[in-house]
Image: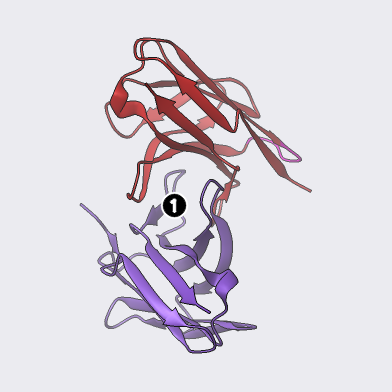
Chain colours: A red, B purple
Amino acid sequence: SQTIHQWPATLVQPVGSPLSLECTVEGTSNPNLYWYRQAAGRGLQLLFYSVGIGQISSEVPQNLSASRPQDRQFILSSKKLLLSDSGFYLCAWSETGYGYTFGSGTRLTVV
Amino acid sequence: DQQVKQNSPSLSVQEGRISILNCDYTNSMFDYFLWYKKYPAEGPTFLISISSIKDKNEDGRFTVFLNKSAKHLSLHIVPSQPGDSAVYFCAASNGTGANNLFFGTGTRLTVIP
């Protein structure tokens, strides 16, 4: 069966520090991968998605970037965090078709 | 442009009563609709879905209704239980391309014991 792993679960980082969040998927090949953010009291905002290794589409201009170095690995990064980067970050995957499966999320607090 | 809208940010219901969560969409090309449930500090989990060829889909206490002419769907929870308290996201898909799922902004349901 397919599983998705996302870590860390919580992270507190100072302003200006770098960020790296990792997501891996098991039990599937060539999935579509997604990074979402849920800011406090807000809905789900799509940040990036990827259809294959090295292929990244950005939905919203951000202080963030994404990379997909391996088929089932998706990384969200920042060189210098801003206070506004605080939020709940979610990784998700889908095969071609309908519906996404989400990871357990990372709570990022920038202080 | 928000293609999927959940106009009620919150809803409170007594335990045992019916909860009705509403969702509207604008894109007539959507042909599959889903509801996700999200607890705090957890990822959304799939709850129930409906294809555009149907107008109702039922799974235990959860029923989703689709009114294509009105571009409206609703989720009914009967009877509501305290464990149903969560944020519910409506989502719609046209199944084309990788970025094919569009989410509403969510409705926070509180079931009062």
Residue closest to the eye, A76 or A89: A89
The majority secondary structure of the magenta stretch comes to loop
Residue drawn at x 39%, y 76% as measured from the top left: B12
Check disc 1 and give the amino acid type: Thr
Residue B90 place in picture, x, y as percent: 41, 64
Residue with the mark numbered 1: B96
Residue B25 is drawn in which quadrant? bottom left
Q: Is residue A53 above or below residue B38?
A: above
Residue drawn at x 53%, y 53% as measured from the top left: B44
| Chain of the residue displaying label 1 | B
Residue B27 place in picture, x, y as percent: 28, 64
Graded by Cα atoms within 10 Å as few (under 14), some (14 to 19) or many (20 or more), the crowding at tag 1 reads few
* Residue with the most extreme right position: A1
* Residue with the most extreme front position: B113
Q: Is residue A49 above or below residue B77?
A: above
Q: Indicate left or right for A26 with B2 as reference.
A: right
A28 drawn magenta? yes
Specify whether residue B65 is in view. Answer: no
Q: Which span of residues is magenta-colored?
A: A26-30
Q: Is residue B101 above or below residue B27?
A: above
Residue closest to the eye, B89 or B29: B89
Q: Secondary structure at mark 1?
A: loop
Instruction: Please identify the quadrant where the C terminus of chain A is shown.
Output: top left
Residue A29 is drawn in which quadrant? top right
Q: Is residue B103 above or below residue B74?
A: above
